[in-house]
Image (cartoon, rainbow, N blue to C red):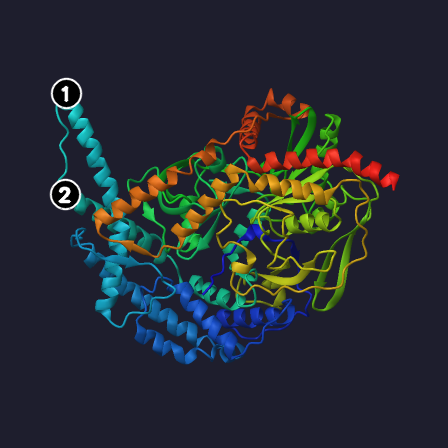
Amino acid sequence: MKRNYNILVLLLLLAFASCSFTTKTFDDPDKDKLLIQVITYVLERGHFDPKAMDDNFSEQVYLDYLDQIDPLKQYFYKSDIEEFSKYKTELDDQLKAYDISFFNLTHERLIKRIEEAKVIYKTILDEPFDYAKNETYDADYENIGYVKNKKELTDRWRQRLKYSNLSNYDELMVEQENLEKINARADSLNTDRVVKKSMAEIEKESREATLKTIDIYYNDYIDDLDRDDWFVMYINAIAQEFDPHTTYFAPQDKEAFNQDMAGKLEGIGARLQKRNDNTKILELISGGPAWRGKELEVGDVIMKVRQEYEKDAITITGMRIDDAIKLIKGPKGTNVFLTVKKVDGTTKVIKITRDIVEIEETHAKSAFVKKDGKNFGIINLPKFYADFEDYQKLNAANDVKNEIIRLKEQGMEGLVLDLRNNGGGSLQTVVEMAGLFIEDGPIVQVRSTEHPKEVLNDTDKSIVWDGPLVILVNEFSASASEIMAAAMQDYKRAIIIGSKQTYGKGTVQSFYDLNNMVRNNQEGDLGALKVTRQKYYRINGGSVQLEGVKSDVVVPDRFSYIDIGEKDQRNPLSWDEIDAADYKLWEGYFDYDTTIKMSNERMKDNEQLKLIADNAQWVRARMDEKTYPLNYEDYKAKLDANETESKTFDKIGEYQTNLTYESLPYEQKLFVQDTVLKDKRQRWHESLSKDVYVEEALHVLQDLKTSYNIKKMATVKD
């Protein structure tokens, strides 16, 4: 079963608006039932593709909700599930009757089972583990069944706790190995030796650390969840059955969401996503603490979190992502220690000093570079940002326009627009930005269920840049990024270099304050609902939904074999197409077809890309592993093997071009007073000099530049 990953950065457009439906009088005084009533009303009338609330819908909600509240199958017995199963096809009827008896039953049983689990894990951790025993831990939670009795449940807990404890045990064993070296040196210097711990002491200390971690998790987080928190999970099991981006926000979550969209990210400067029972790094915010530290990477899994004032780390595997975020976030200036499983399979403890990341850190930035006597520019755009309260004051289109003008003043002969990891943003902004590169014409088509399609056009006939253009994308380029890349590809205005396809999110969401739906609400804040209201389409009529934008030049990256796109989410809307808009191809003299062919030939023989592709396959193989040894010698051997294998890919980070990037003159003047900005730009330039994808983009710009006069002469001669 595929899971939903709530990734807020992939929004194409957020319309903070009152609902377009007629406000209805809801008369149920019970807040839970009122919430069900309001949400089903909005979903049935407001969703782009409303689903029939029938038995099939009921069964999926049933399965998804149980998966949310007991993902590791560590609480419920098979008998519990058999009792719950009578509701499997009745939830649609309950929703229509605003009946929440299924939730009440499962919630009461869950609380009871959690209390029983506390006794189980304490009992298990009170006894030593036998690390010489040959056994394995099965982490394939989706395919294992529920236990039949307490004995089976206890053994499931024992195996999971033993596996979790192995990392603590191994850390202590490594410490002892280091003490051996210290004592050997002490012997040579005839100084006092350090007293080593016995194996029994090491084993006991590791269990005590695990027990403390789990106690903190239950006492500080699980026990703090009240009935409303669990009810939100039930609501979202219903909402996300419509599509992965339709989500309910409880009042406190609504406030956090608004703060995020306002542009302030407090903490380590990273966006996280839930993947099975793991918390993964989805994005590093440019200029943020994690980005500055250079150690955390997209795709890393955070396993444990330790505060600077605490001795022991808390395991967050299996923890709700909201709870994990609470642990990771903290006041500016404080330190947090993350135990991370790297994408290459190795484990590392990373110290990050928390800070506040302002939206300015996600703005467009540019650099210029000389290559073979020619001047080229690169603009990096992390998101299609805009200030909706004062659009003219702040939007990405204006900023990119200004950067292009400044680059032209430096004699730019070709431009790279880097949209890698750009998760989207403002629809208006991307339409205006696309217009910087064409005279005028359609950019994107938008369709909703109750209205005919709308074609959004660039109406400004001015062109800011008419020279060679390359757009870089990857699997994390989504929504507005896909509109931009698709439009330039359809006009044959730019060459797209990147992953096999972009993320594939072709939907538009609106954000509804549910309090506006109820007259004379006496039940308090009802929260908000983000609802998929529209789909957008390329000007050629095709949708990017699921399929994304396919690159003209496909290059492998470390995420090539990881399931991260829209097609890998639960319940995505389907791909379809509509009539093409009326548009004309770009009337330039660049030979795109020959240039693409030349680039593909270069990439085919590129040793760096071959190594990256091998690494991507190796990472995928590690991710697919579901069975782990509980024998310490086997566990250690596996760790060592992964460490050794991962070193074969160290050369990826050693790659270096002979290119030097520089900031524009206006920024260089700012460096005199702003040394932090200077450091950020130097870091960026350093990464560009090691970037094989940017290097190839510059090759393509050279080829396009060369093809211009040749094709123009041939056209004139004809």
Picture residue at 65% right of the left edge, 21% below the top: 669
List the single residue furthest toward the right.
717
Instruction: Say which of marks 2 and 1 sits in front.
Output: 1
Tell me the quarter of the image containing the C terminus: top right
Q: Position of residue 554 (x, y in %)?
A: 59, 47
Q: Of the residues under marks 2 and 1, which one precedes in the sequence?
A: 1
Q: What SS does tag 2 mark?
A: helix
Q: Is residue 287 left or right of residue 71?
A: right
Which numbered marker is on residue 188? 1
Whole-Å distance between the Cαs marked 2 and 1?
A: 25 Å
* Residue indicated by mark 2: 199
Q: What SS does tag 1 mark?
A: helix
Tell me the quarter of the image containing the N terminus: bottom left
Q: Is residue 641 left or right of residue 122?
A: right
Q: Nearer the viewer, residue 339 or 138?
A: 138
Q: Is residue 182 above or below residue 150?
A: above
Q: Position of residue 78 (x, y in %)?
A: 31, 73
Looking at numbered disc 2 in the image, what kind of residue is underneath it? Met
Number of dots carrying numbers:
2
Looking at numbered disc 1 in the image, what kind of residue is underneath it? Ser
**Does residue 576 appear anywhere in the picture?**
yes
Q: Is residue 216 left or right of residue 654?
A: left
Q: Nearer the viewer, residue 286 or 487?
A: 487
Picture residue at 44% right of the left edge, 77% below the top: 88
Few, some or many residues within 10 Å of mark 2 (<14, 14–19, 20+): few
Q: Position of residue 412 (x, y in %)?
A: 72, 29
Q: Position of residue 38 (x, y in %)?
A: 57, 70
